[in-house]
Image: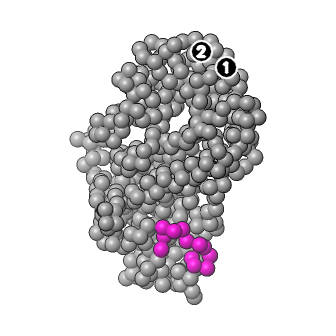
């Protein structure tokens, strides 16, 4: 029987950041077995340089497209904080001269903390999205009043402006989110978020146009499927840009569109996506529609979240035991839980790149991966490209480690980092990996494995 490395080599083209050396896996040049020997498992890790790499790549392809088509507007990169709120993520992202997008009242204290630490100044764009409760509008108003001149609340409903009428006492910029139509197979026809197309122009004329306090700066667009080369995406983007052109003719100060997030990340070894082509098509389509309507092209904002941080993350487990439950179903039991630590794999059947860390020269076989909780759904048994999982065979005295890669977005926030998990499975330790000025690997423990004492405190026993 062929070895595990033969199976992978003959089936896939490896991503650049995953290499095998001496039968062990390297992630962005980091020998993962060295990390395991130092910290043990289970563990989550974040490779910080990947964040900056993705930001710079997106900036490059959009600016190249702008140059190629002689596009008169500019490109601005915002990071969508809800993808990962960790301080080390925001600090790394902000090194790249970017701006941020928020979605909750509790994002604003993070803005304050970053400003106090010197990582973010008051001239950065703070694009405030979401349906806003009073505390959120209060915090936004305080930012504006305190001199955050580019804090832009994106109005999500017709009543939101009332809060700024009452609380803001200086000139401010506004955005309006357009309620886009959902994908044809979605349960609802139109997004619950944003303001209807038919209401926007009248709302601007009645509430914003003649009020010297307000400048309508931005029109905001987002669809759940992301930036994809489909008829649905191009149709919705075109409809949105036509609305921008219509509104621009009565609102000369409107000069920016925000096309939201949605650049995908690689969650399969068979991933194919032409980022350069999509950036060019976005620029070319916007320019063509604006020229057709005789209006200046807008500046373009994006709010990439998963694209910023997703591919920086990984989760590593060890195999505790192998159990043959009938004649053909072999289980590898891991020292963690998919439900609590990779909730997307359970809640929405999201697949990630999954590979063995060691024993690449061993023969392979089909397995099911089982988590530690007592829930029957705590398992992983199919890849994105095939309805099976293959891993190296192991003898009784052998240890096998496996990793899930590109898990850096949303998993901690959806799983409730540091809180109470199903069956009281603890949050694993989290290791940060960086490189020093000479390119040497530097690791640090951001957080140890969650303790029983912390759980008892949350539950009221202490």
Residue at the spot 54% in from the left edge and 12% down from the top edge? 211
Q: Nearer the viewer, residue 60 or 14?
A: 60
Badge 1 vs badge 2, beta-carbon distance below 8 Å: yes
Count of marks placed on residues: 2
Q: Nearer the viewer, residue 431 or 443?
A: 443
Q: Nearer the viewer, residue 92 or 107?
A: 92
Gap in Å between the C-alphas at discs 1 and 2? 9 Å
For disc 1, the marked residue is 250
Report x, y in % for residue 206. Answer: 62, 12
Residue at the spot 57% in from the left edge and 48% down from the top edge? 63
Report x, y in % for residue 405. Answer: 48, 62
**Quarter of the image where one finds residue 366:** bottom right
**Quarter of the image where one finds residue 286:** top right
Q: Nearer the viewer, residue 71 or 402?
A: 71
- Seen from this angle, which residue lies furthest bottom? 1
Instruction: Tell me the quadrant of the picture where the N terminus can be found.
Output: bottom right
Q: Is residue 156 magenta?
A: no
Looking at the rendering, the stretch of residues picked out in magenta corresponds to: 8-19
For disc 2, the marked residue is 209
């Amino acid at each position: 029987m062929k070895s595990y490395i033969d199976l992978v080599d003959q089936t896939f083209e490896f991503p650049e950041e995953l290499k095998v050396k001496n039968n062990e896996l390297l992630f962005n040049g980091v020998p993962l077995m060295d990390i395991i020997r130092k910290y043990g498992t289970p563990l989550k890790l974040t490779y910080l340089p990947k964040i900056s790499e993705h930001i710079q790549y997106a900036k490059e392809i959009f600016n190249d497209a702008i140059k190629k088509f002689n596009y008169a507007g500019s490109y601005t990169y915002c990071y969508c904080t809800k993808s990962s709120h960790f301080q080390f993520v925001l600090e790394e992202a902000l090194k790249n001269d970017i701006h941020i997008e928020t979605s909750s009242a509790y994002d604003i204290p993070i803005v304050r903390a970053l400003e106090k630490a010197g990582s973010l100044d008051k001239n950065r764009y703070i694009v405030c999205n979401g349906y806003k409760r009073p505390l959120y509008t209060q915090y936004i108003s305080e930012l504006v009043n305190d001199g955050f001149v580019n804090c832009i609340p994106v109005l999500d409903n017709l009543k939101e402006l009332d809060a700024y009428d009452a609380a803001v006492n200086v000139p401010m910029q506004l955005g309006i989110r357009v309620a886009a139509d959902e994908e044809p197979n979605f349960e609802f026809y139109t997004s619950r978020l944003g303001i209807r197309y038919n209401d926007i122009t009248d709302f601007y004329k009645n509430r914003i146009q003649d009020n010297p306090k307000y400048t309508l700066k931005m029109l905001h667009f987002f669809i759940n499927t992301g930036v994809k080369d489909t008829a649905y995406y191009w149709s919705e983007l075109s409809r949105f840009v036509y609305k921008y052109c219509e509104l621009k003719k009565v609102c000369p100060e409107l000069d920016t569109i925000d096309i939201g997030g949605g650049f995908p990340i690689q969650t399969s070894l068979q991933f194919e996506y032409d980022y350069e082509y999509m950036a060019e098509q976005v620029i070319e389509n916007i320019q063509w529609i604006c020229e057709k309507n005789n209006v200046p092209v807008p500046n373009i904002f994006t709010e990439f979240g998963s694209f910023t941080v997703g591919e920086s993350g990984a989760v590593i487990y060890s195999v505790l035991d192998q159990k043959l439950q009938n004649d053909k179903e072999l289980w590898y039991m891991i020292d963690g839980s998919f439900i609590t630590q990779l909730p997307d794999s359970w809640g929405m059947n999201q697949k990630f790149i999954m590979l063995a860390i060691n024993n690449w020269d061993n023969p392979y076989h089909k397995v099911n991966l089982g988590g530690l909780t007592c829930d029957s759904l705590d398992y992983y048994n199919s890849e994105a490209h095939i309805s099976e999982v293959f891993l190296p065979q192991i003898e009784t005295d052998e240890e096998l480690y496996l990793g899930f890669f590109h898990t850096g977005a949303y998993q901690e926030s959806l799983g409730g980092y540091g809180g109470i998990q199903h069956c009281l499975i603890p949050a694993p330790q989290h290791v940060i990996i960086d490189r020093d000025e000479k390119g040497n690997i530097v690791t640090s423990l951001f957080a140890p494995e969650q303790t029983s004492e912390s759980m008892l405190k949350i539950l009221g026993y202490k």
